[in-house]
Amino acid sequence: MPFARVTVDMSAIDSWDSFHTVFKEALGFPDFYGRNMNAWIDCLTSLDAPEDGLTAVHAPVGGVMVLDLPGTRALGARCPDIYSALIECSAFVNYRRIANGSDSVLCLSFFD
């Protein structure tokens, strides 16, 4: 399966504000990004749709975007609510796509 890969450093996250800043910068969310988890889900749902203009990086056609997330263990200890939301909302991105007849597009890779 073809894939693209982006590294998002979890060590820079210590609040919801920093979470949204880090992901906006890493994935190239648009200036109108709402900085909430609904907007985050919307952007990631369109990872394979450059025409939507919701990310600057894209999954290849028929493939997935792998988010390499170094520092996830420390994020879980430091910000358990953000860690949980990251997992739940990522799963929802794929669920939403499958429910709409598309394939999963997001894969998380946790390592320290």
Image (cartoon, helix red, strand yellow):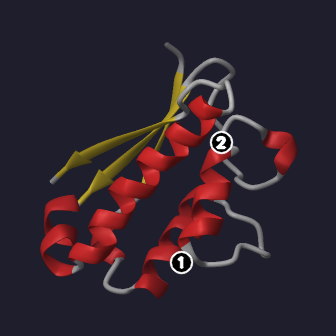
Query: Percent position (x, y) of residue 76?
Result: 18, 68
Q: Nearer the viewer, mark 1 or mark 2?
A: 2
Name the residue beneath numbered marker 2: 47
- 73 lies above or below 51: below
Residue at left 35%, top 63%? Answer: 9
First in sequence: mark 1 vs mark 2: 1
Residue projecting furthest to the right = 51
Which quarter of the rendering shows the C terminus?
bottom left
- Report, in whole angstroms, how far the alpha carbon at label 1 lies from the one at label 2: 18 Å
Query: Which amino acid, mark 1?
Result: Thr
Query: Which amino acid, mark 2?
Result: Leu
Q: Quadrant of residue 61?
A: top right
Q: Estimate how packed mark 2 is, as few (under 14), some (14 to 19) or many (20 or more) residues with alpha carbons within 10 Å.
A: many
Q: Quadrant of residue 42?
A: bottom right
Q: Quadrant of residue 25?
A: bottom right
- 66 lies above or below 32: above
Q: Is residue 111 left or right of residue 18?
A: left
Query: Percent position (x, y) of residue 96?
Result: 59, 42
Residue at left 37%, top 86%? Answer: 15
Identify the element where label 2 is drawn. Answer: loop
Tell which of 75 and 45 is nearer to you.
45
Q: Which mark is residue 21?
A: 1
Tell which of 15 and 6 is nearer to you.
15
Identify the element where label 1 is drawn. Answer: helix
Query: Percent position (x, y) of residue 105?
Result: 55, 33
Tell which of 27 and 15 is nearer to you.
15
Residue projecting furthest to the top = 1
Residue projecting furthest to the front = 99
- 18 lies above or below 95: below
